[in-house]
Amino acid sequence: MIKTAIVGATGYTGSELVRLLYNHPDVSLNMITSESRKGEPFSAVHPHFEGLVDITLQGADAVLEEELDMVFLALPHGVSMEYVKQYEQAAFNIVDLSGDFRLSGPQVYESWYQKPHTFPSGFQGAVYGLPELHANAISKASLVANPGCYPTSAILGLAPLAHAGLIDPASIIIDAKSGITGAGIKAKPTTHYSNVNDNFKAYGLKSHRHTIEIQEQLGWLHHSELTVQFTPHLLPVDRGILSTIYAAPIKPVSEKQLKGLYADFYRHAPFVRLRKTPPTLKDVRGTNFCDIFITFDERTGRIITLSAIDNLVKGAAGQAMQNMNLQFGLPQDRGFVSLPLNP
Amino acid sequence: MIKTAIVGATGYTGSELVRLLYNHPDVSLNMITSESRKGEPFSAVHPHFEGLVDITLQGADAVLEEELDMVFLALPHGVSMEYVKQYEQAAFNIVDLSGDFRLSGPQVYESWYQKPHTFPSGFQGAVYGLPELHANAISKASLVANPGCYPTSAILGLAPLAHAGLIDPASIIIDAKSGITGAGIKAKPTTHYSNVNDNFKAYGLKSHRHTIEIQEQLGWLHHSELTVQFTPHLLPVDRGILSTIYAAPIKPVSEKQLKGLYADFYRHAPFVRLRKTPPTLKDVRGTNFCDIFITFDERTGRIITLSAIDNLVKGAAGQAMQNMNLQFGLPQDRGFVSLPLNP
Amino acid sequence: MIKTAIVGATGYTGSELVRLLYNHPDVSLNMITSESRKGEPFSAVHPHFEGLVDITLQGADAVLEEELDMVFLALPHGVSMEYVKQYEQAAFNIVDLSGDFRLSGPQVYESWYQKPHTFPSGFQGAVYGLPELHANAISKASLVANPGCYPTSAILGLAPLAHAGLIDPASIIIDAKSGITGAGIKAKPTTHYSNVNDNFKAYGLKSHRHTIEIQEQLGWLHHSELTVQFTPHLLPVDRGILSTIYAAPIKPVSEKQLKGLYADFYRHAPFVRLRKTPPTLKDVRGTNFCDIFITFDERTGRIITLSAIDNLVKGAAGQAMQNMNLQFGLPQDRGFVSLPLNP
Amino acid sequence: MIKTAIVGATGYTGSELVRLLYNHPDVSLNMITSESRKGEPFSAVHPHFEGLVDITLQGADAVLEEELDMVFLALPHGVSMEYVKQYEQAAFNIVDLSGDFRLSGPQVYESWYQKPHTFPSGFQGAVYGLPELHANAISKASLVANPGCYPTSAILGLAPLAHAGLIDPASIIIDAKSGITGAGIKAKPTTHYSNVNDNFKAYGLKSHRHTIEIQEQLGWLHHSELTVQFTPHLLPVDRGILSTIYAAPIKPVSEKQLKGLYADFYRHAPFVRLRKTPPTLKDVRGTNFCDIFITFDERTGRIITLSAIDNLVKGAAGQAMQNMNLQFGLPQDRGFVSLPLNP
């Protein structure tokens, strides 16, 4: 059994990790921590777990006192790096669900996150935890930086094209729409029901931090820098991201060729489903799937890709468990039992 | 392995059965039928199953040609009875998810369902499939009549009180609120998004068919007839029923006594959760739980019970699988892996 | 022109007052105040008014410096009473939208609101602002206590029965369901989108403050004390309250007789619509209507009443404008132009 | 008074026309027709009008028998052209809300609508009813073709750029998101609550009929053909369209310059609000506003425009009333009283 702890239990990623790990046959969930709710049962914070997961929340310092194999950090960026630093010598593996070690280094981080990075050397061992691109490196990494939700959706939607060098690197537009859980569990005007319900808006125009994450990974695939236009929007739904992606091919291309390219690129990816028709958010709700639909518009000469994930699963906790599986030499899909909850 | 077929695949209960049975370690899903979509893959009807369950839909006549252990009928009432009749001599067990065999006999059926019953003798072997009341009978039955969604919620909310003879049989009011999937997958004005979204209404005032189902079961527990006031409402949510139940005790009672009564009555019921605080619909979403909260209002002298289920799971497909488990001598909760999907 | 000020601009009742007063031909909106956003344009707080109402927010002390005819207090309870006290000698009329002067006196207030009342003598001149019951008194009052949203719905649903002495005063059950704006504009866990969306729950069981408000008004109509069971629930909708009301008649009654009783009682009430079928929330959205449907269940012997309002209009700002009309000798429906926004 | 008839009462545009015309001081609503519900009161079809608009529905042939000044056709495309033909000699003005006369001629129509056009000569007198572009022509037209909802949003978002010749005509991408009322009042799988709620999807990829409408109008402004990429999506909201529009300038441009260009272009447009921050759908709900936000992304070199309307008002019935005002020499905003219903 993989002895596991979750650091940070009050948010959505924490509770979603519990939901997923609960059914993993090789995992024992030994510890959940929360500084603000220490001493309370986990189910006092998330009452839907009453009678299921009533384990008492501990302080994060307890992590170093127990013999653990695996630690998930479900903390805000800026906070997470402190824990990674503190756990540097620890024997356990880490998946960090924050944005603290996703980028190529501290300078880029500081420029897009607008705050100093207090553990720059942590970047050296960190591997970007998108299994469809970096499975091999992840399997050897003790620190995995779990990707952002939008980048997961956008990168998987574009990876085969970037990898094949098929698209104009200045042509990429990612028009992304996310459910409200992406904004976190904290109550704020943005998450007030009446500001979200029956409503829709764009936000973070031109400057969202996930832009650089997408650029770096696609640039790595493309073997050259590229610039993406990324516009996030807020949907009146709980879960899910749908990215509508536009790109111009640099040479003539057919729809059939594109579908073949994607099928080949993802032939070993258990969680990528290449769909016959455009996916909806509920098609992936509660699951670790990334559903992709690709088409070519002959009239305009553009490739259009639709990519759908559940932001809390493939965009966070599920991907983290997938990374853990790789770190421990298990099949990527080991322990995943949820089918789409639709409707 | 229990060789299983689902008759009727196009509705929500059919697809929900597939979702649940998929993870049952002792079940093989050998056949799914649909008269209207025969020959198509199951995933053509429910595209979120693409790549997961692509089995070809057959006609219902195929059921008798295969060696099966278990058949679920996910059909409308009035249609289901024809299949039960046709399968009378078959060796397999049946759980019928329609309303055709839930009541005490054909006369009551005809009076509340306003249509003739074409297989009256079917009532003789049929057992009402509410495991919390009839586990023993279910385990011996070859035909189980799976309860209605509202009755499941209402009966479980009141059963300990009725069984203890603690309440005035004329005082019961069940004010129930259901998600829209209870109205079925068929597109009609009632289910049009813009009639439901940001809206709420009562319907079926004074005459809903589930009234008699509730009365019969509570009357059986109470050892005398009783009359319930049942008012269903339509919520702008996909899944879930919350029943707010009012009843007057016939003698002084304390909150502590009530909680003890419920704890005792449900001590062997793996899916009933007695909650410390009023449950919400999302606390049970996707699961087979029935969450119950009971309290006593000293000011008014009334007992108030809140009972929450997922209408597609504990109110339909989940309860059906629970019944199957009993019929095959398995633990009631065998094969259930879904935790509440919240948010 | 009635020179008008709104004290308290940041909440929903404040912005709804602006929306309604904007089209009133006899009203000039001279001033809007906010302590927290003083100096900003009103449309900075409520951006949907950009270009429509950009008036600068002032501090509440400005109210006494200007010649005004009418002041609306759109403040939380506990705060409002301080302003009423301060404005005691002012020449303008007041409609107070808080709960501070709705009850019969300070003792009742303190017992249900759990806080001291700092202006007990204010109760003397205050009139309960439900025009369908107290039009005459309102027209002479300088201080009108605008009713609570739930009480408006519940009292209007029951008034003819209570007034006719037709119902058992111990039999009343009000099962009420409200949209989320009733919980206010402040971001808190209760109003977080993901706690509300696709969800439903009861709250305030046995102890909600609106209970006493309902009891006092119905008791006044009934010429004797009565006890109501009041259970509020939280709907995943923005606006609207539907109350499902149960009561037992003390003597035989027919449906026809009930409909006649209501038609007669409300013959001069321009905002009460007696409906042929059960109303939905969207039937009244954005309007000052209270839609009522009444029926008698011969099987159970109970009267069932359904009463629907928009909690921000008839349950708050619209009723306040209706009261103002009475205070200034105008027709109750003067200046109301909104028809139901449906869908 | 303008004596007015609405032909086609059962859909959303019909009921929305009634809601808006109700408050127009110069309009008398003399007739509403419906072939399927002839003889019933209008409020039987739309019960929220009970007591407000109970006028009896007539057959469309009655239109020619009464002396009318104005007829609105709220009919499906393909049906509408038959009525326009029939009314060719009539003295009244027509606003046709269908797509039948929006395009430049029958060939284009037949190619994008995939059906023959049975009244080709009707195109000659028809004027495209977007008042912000064609006010003068509309004021002289007896047949106005009311624009589609998506085109209204897209064209208004891009018109100043196209008119100024500032953008690369091959660079335009319109990623549009619409509420469900855009799909009509008919119950079908697409509009089933559980297919829409908590869900999101793209549809009509590469081939939506509104594409050509946008292209023709922008091409007219741009004095040359241009190709737009148009991708519609379906939002879980009732009303509203938000278009996120990307275009590349052909020469260096500053944000300030863009804002000046828009302010100038729309200086006489009472319903276009140039917003300081990105608009949300609820900012315009129930109103005839088109809210526009424009910005320039220096990093990518693209102009981004956000354009929000209520699809039933500015996208249909409100624009129709605005056109009628022009046809009768009234101010464009005459009779409009609805402010945004938010929340």
Image (cartoon, coloured by chain):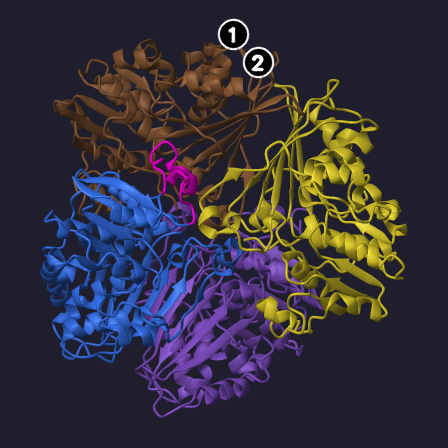
Chain colours: A yellow, B purple, C blue, D brown
Q: Name the residue under label 1.
A: D224
* Label 2: element kind: loop
Q: Which residue lies furthest to the bottom in this view?
A: B251
**Count of labels in the image:** 2
How crowded pointer 1 is (Cα within 10 Å; few <14, some 14-19, many 20+) is rated as: few
Return the residue found at the far front.
C65
- At 36% across and 62% down in the image, what residue appears? C177
Label 2 Cα crowd, 10 Å radius (few <14 / some 14-19 / many 20+): many
Segment colored magenta:
C36-57
The three-letter amino acid code for the residue at tag 1 is Ser
Q: In this rendering, is residue B260 above or below B67?
A: below
Instruction: List x then y, in percent, for residue C89.
Output: 19, 57
Point 28% across, 22% down: residue? D332
Does residue D185 lie above or below A46 as drawn? above
Residue D182 seen in the current view: yes
Q: Picture quarter containing residue C66?
A: top left
Q: List x then y, in percent, for residue B68.
A: 65, 66
Q: Which amino acid does label 2 sit on?
A: Pro
Q: Nearer the viewer, residue A86 or D221?
A: A86
Left or right: residue B136 compared with residue C214: right
Residue D165's disc number: none
Q: Mark 2 points at which residue?
A: D169
Output the chain of dot 2: D
Q: Quick one: C231 or D259, which is closer to the camera? A: D259
Q: Position of residue C274 (x, y in %)?
A: 18, 56
Q: Are marks 1 and 2 in contact (CB under 8 Å)?
A: yes
| Magenta segment includes C48 | yes
SS of the residue under disc 1: loop
